[in-house]
Image (cartoon, grey):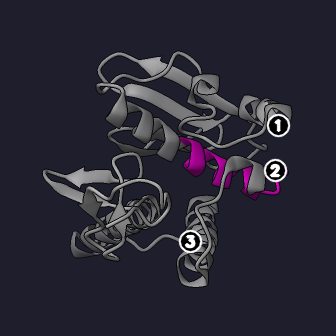
Amino acid sequence: MQCKTHPDRKATHICASCNASLCDDCAEETGSGVYTCFQCAMLQSVSAVGSGLTEKREKAIEKGLKKKKWGPFHYFSLISSVLILVMWGVIIFGGQEAPSASGVVLERGKADRVLLFLVDGALKRYAHYEGNRYPESLYDLVPKYLQIGKDRLSVLDRLSYVKEPGVGYELAVADVGDGDMNVVLTPKGVKFIQPSGGGSS
């Protein structure tokens, strides 16, 4: 059986979600002995974030806390989740390959957040295949773990990447608009940084 993405390679794993045949480079280990393709791993990651937010909201209601009005955080979470789910839905059900960073319309704002999640996926792939280490720079991801043309490498400067002992790394959009919620991705989860005057959750 050959890999779905690389027909010239022998498949060594089967995606636990969509049953696609995968080679070692395409398989993402999402649990002990559980492998998925890159697309399914991204969908599970987005779904986990959404489930976490729902659980927090339900716990707050159970404790009798007063229901708050929707703020920037809620709108950002909703819009980002919808955009990412739509993008991956088109990829999975449209039979297209996973997008490279060069395939994204890299404009400020929402596109930077899409780039953020693509690079985060590349960092996780790097750690998986490089002995749980993280690169010194985002440029070290190219081209093996992140497909991007040499003429587009400057788009990586839109992200802030810092290796953090004990955490692994922190990845965020470098230039966030005034009053906008910033998202910081780490191997342990997602942190939401409130606009000036707020804290993180």
Residue 7 against residue 188 in the figure, above or below: below
Between the C-alphas of marks 2 and 3, the distance is 17 Å
Residue range corresponding to the magenta coloring? 104-119
Residue 29 placement (x, y as % from top left): 27, 50
Q: Residue furthest front?
A: 8
Left or right, 150 with reference to 146: right
Q: Residue furthest left?
A: 32
Query: Is residue 188 found inside the magenta-colored segment of the image?
Result: no
Q: Of tags 1 and 2, which is closer to the observer? A: 1
Task: Categorize mark 2 by other alpha carbons within 10 Å: few (<14), some (14-19), many (20+).
Answer: some
Task: Categorize mark 3 by other alpha carbons within 10 Å: few (<14), some (14-19), many (20+).
Answer: some
Amino acid beneath label 3: Trp
Residue 172 placement (x, y as % from top left): 59, 37
Dot 3: what SS?
helix
For image coordinates 47% across by 64% down, the residue present is 39
Q: Which quadrant does the C terminus fall into? A: top left
Residue 113 placement (x, y as % from top left): 66, 51
**Does residue 9 appear anywhere in the picture?**
yes
Task: Categorize mark 1 by other alpha carbons within 10 Å: few (<14), some (14-19), many (20+).
Answer: few
Work out whether mark 2 precedes mark 3 in sequence or the reverse, and give the earlier one: 3
Between the C-alphas of marks 1 and 3, the distance is 22 Å
* Displayed quadrant of residue 62: bottom left
Residue designated by label 3? 88
Residue 121 against residue 94 in the figure, above or below: above
* Displayed quadrant of residue 177: top right
The numbered disc on residue 106 is 2
Query: Is residue 105 found inside the magenta-colored segment of the image?
Result: yes
Residue designated by label 1? 152
Between the C-alphas of marks 1 and 2, the distance is 10 Å
Work out whether mark 1 precedes mark 3 in sequence or the reverse, and give the earlier one: 3
